[in-house]
């Protein structure tokens, strides 16, 4: 079951793929009092990596990273879902998107022990339509 659904923003930060880069990015955000609510990352074949960050203040985070020399920063619209942390929750969520012909471009999530919701971050072929599905 979806407990909350909102449209949100994530920062996609392209960095040189080197040891310690995530430590540096997270330090910059922490030093500015910013919390990371969701994170994903992957390396590319050209010696770069992309960090996808959902933070509590996207404008301040973007400014802090820019001032620190990170130039390849992009804002993406995403759907933020708080879902029950139990077996079948992801199955139900993705089946609903499939039935309504909404393609998932990518997703990532967080979880905690039973009893608290998991947070899913989705980028879909139609974020507004997806949001409406889960607001019902």
Image (spheres, rainbow, N blue to C red):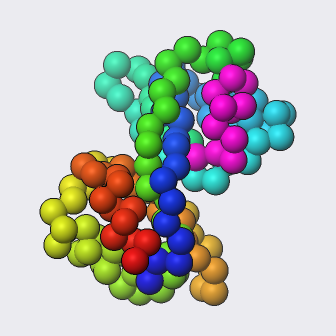
Res 11 seen here: yes
Query: Could you tell me residue 35's position as x and y percent?
Result: 73, 47
Point out the stretch of residues depicted in magenta. 54-64
Query: Could you tell me residue 133's position as x and y percent?
Result: 33, 70
Query: Could you tell me residue 114's position as x and y percent?
Result: 60, 85
**Is 56 part of what is drawn in magenta?**
yes
Q: Nearer the viewer, residue 110 or 42?
A: 110
**Is 28 part of what is drawn in magenta?**
no
46 vs 82, left or right, is left
133 vs 24, left or right, is left
Task: Report the quarter where the N terminus lies.
Answer: bottom left
Q: Residue at x 50, y 18 (%)?
A: 72
Picture layout, residue 43 above or below residue 123: above
Q: Residue at x 53, y 35 (%)?
A: 11
Picture layout, residue 92 above or below residue 77: below
Task: Report the quarter where the C terminus lies.
Answer: bottom left
Quarter of image, res 60: top right
Query: Could you tell me residue 105's position as x and y percent?
Result: 28, 48
Q: Residue at x 63, y 86 (%)?
A: 115
Q: Residue at x 48, y 53 (%)?
A: 7
Quarter of image, res 20: top right
The rendered magenta stretch, by its main secondary structure, is classed as helix
């Amino acid at each position: 079951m979806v407990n909350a659904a909102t449209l949100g923003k994530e920062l996609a930060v392209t960095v040189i793929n080197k040891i310690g880069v995530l430590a540096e990015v997270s330090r910059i955000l922490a030093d500015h009092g910013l919390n990371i609510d969701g994170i994903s990352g992957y390396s590319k074949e050209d010696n770069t990596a992309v960090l996808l960050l959902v933070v509590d203040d996207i404008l301040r985070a973007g400014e802090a990273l820019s001032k620190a020399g990170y130039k390849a920063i992009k804002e993406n619209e995403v759907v933020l879902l708080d879902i029950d942390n139990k077996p079948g929750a992801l199955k139900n969520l993705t089946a609903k998107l499939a039935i309504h012909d909404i393609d998932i471009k990518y997703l990532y999530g967080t979880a905690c022990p039973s009893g608290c919701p998991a947070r899913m971050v989705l980028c879909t072929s139609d974020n507004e339509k997806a949001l409406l599905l889960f607001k019902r």
